[in-house]
Amino acid sequence: MRTVDVIVLGAGMVGTSTALQLQRRGLDVALVDRRQPGEETSHGNAGIIERNGFLPPGFPGDAKFLLNIALGRWPGANYSLSAVMRLLPWLMAFRRHGSRTGVQRLAHAMNALEAYAAGEHRVLAEAAEALKYYRRTGAVHVYRTEAGFEATVAERHYARIFGVDYHELDDLDLNELEPYLTAEGCRGIFWPESESVSNPGAVTKAFARSLAEKGGEIMIGDARRLTRSHGGWAIATDKGPVRGRAVALCLGPWSMDILKGFGYRFPLAVKRGYHQHYKARAGAGLSRPVVDAEMGYVLAPMEKGIRLTTGIELAERDAAPTPVQVERAFRKAREIFPLTVPAEPGAWMGSRPCFPDSLPVLGAAPGESGLWLNFGHGHCGFTLGPVTGHILADLITGVPPVIDPAPLSPLRFL
């Protein structure tokens, strides 16, 4: 049986980053997933390393807005009624965390994490020879109405408090920044400290290769077969059984499949999302991700074309895909940017693991020696994977953490 210091379960951005951060501290690491690295949620996101994102996703309270969601008129959301009914307690908790106190708590926690996010990405990317995927061109949020722009007053307020740079834009400014946008009458915010990548899945795979080249193990295995073993942990893999003195659970939307078996009841919900790559009119392009904030989708320039990523779908995690949002968002996107035809057949679907306070769980699992948790990053897994991996590696090795992990403690839900 192969013995390592830490078994990391989950080979998305959070898991590969955690494994690399542990390896950088001299630990022997095995990275275990049921699939190859970077082939689930970390493959399909918008590839943004955010430096804004201080507020939780808005909870719809306007009756007209709710009606538009119910009737399928808003591209930013889709739902299964049975899933919504099952998620009612979570949705009510999410709404409670949208209070002034909850928002303030989230803003300060996210600022602390995002202040380190881009730097931690670049440390790992440089070691993995993956800097070629990274862009320091910022991100722009477009608002089709003055009311939509004015609704960002709280986010701009926190940006000023935290010293995060942003530029308010009119339609002429938007066209100067992105000449192929049709932005007449729109407002915008440019976030120059945000970064992005041209292929999120390739970045995750590069991180995993870097781990293997430096002696780490990449293994295929079913995390549900995790067992306690002689004071540590063990799991069967394609390379035989592996035992670890500790295990780091970084399984995103699949985390509770394992944790329920150990008696944990974390309030994790799953929001599904889709993407589709499109071609643009000849000569047209984007230099950075464009968030159409009021319509709930993102246009991100990728190696395969312009990636259109949708908002949220409340549906059962393993239910068949229902990519109706892609077509709805595509129709809205063509109003502001000259998309033409799909660059590949079919839409991709992934799942975002979300807690009602919009923060991940990170730290030691109460009552289980050697079990460590790093999951529930919501819409920010790609942004936060390297920095939460750094914090967890600090905790596991007994080093004072680079950021106070108290706001992320598992104890807040137990």
Image (cartoon, helix red, strand yellow):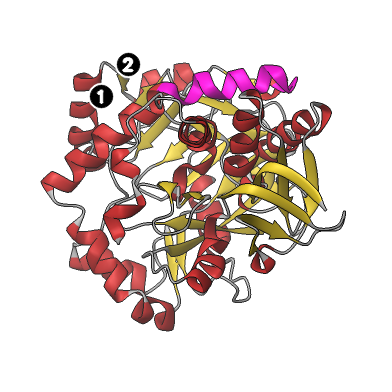
The dot on residue 267 is none
For disc 1, the neighbor class at 10 Å (few under 14, some 14 to 19, many from 20) is many
Residue 60: x, y in percent? 25, 60
Q: Is residue 259 left or right of residue 165?
A: right
Along the viewing direction, whichever of 349 and 234 lies nearer the viewer: 234
Residue extending farthest to the front is: 230
**Which residue is denoted by mark 2 in the rendering?**
165
Residues at badges 1 and 2 in contact (C-beta under 8 Å)? yes
Question: Is residue 363 located in the magenta-colored stretch of the structure?
Answer: no
Q: Is residue 254 left or right of residue 79?
A: right
Q: Is residue 111 above or below residue 165?
A: below
**Residue 35: in sight, yes or no?**
yes
User: Which stretch appears magenta?
Assistant: 116-130
Residue 170: x, y in percent? 31, 23
Residue 191: x, y in percent? 39, 23
Query: In which quadrant is the C terminus drawn?
Result: bottom left
**Which residue is denoted by mark 1 in the rendering?**
159
Label 2 SS: loop
- Reading the chain from its start, which is encountered first: label 1 or label 2? 1
Residue extending farthest to the bottom is: 82
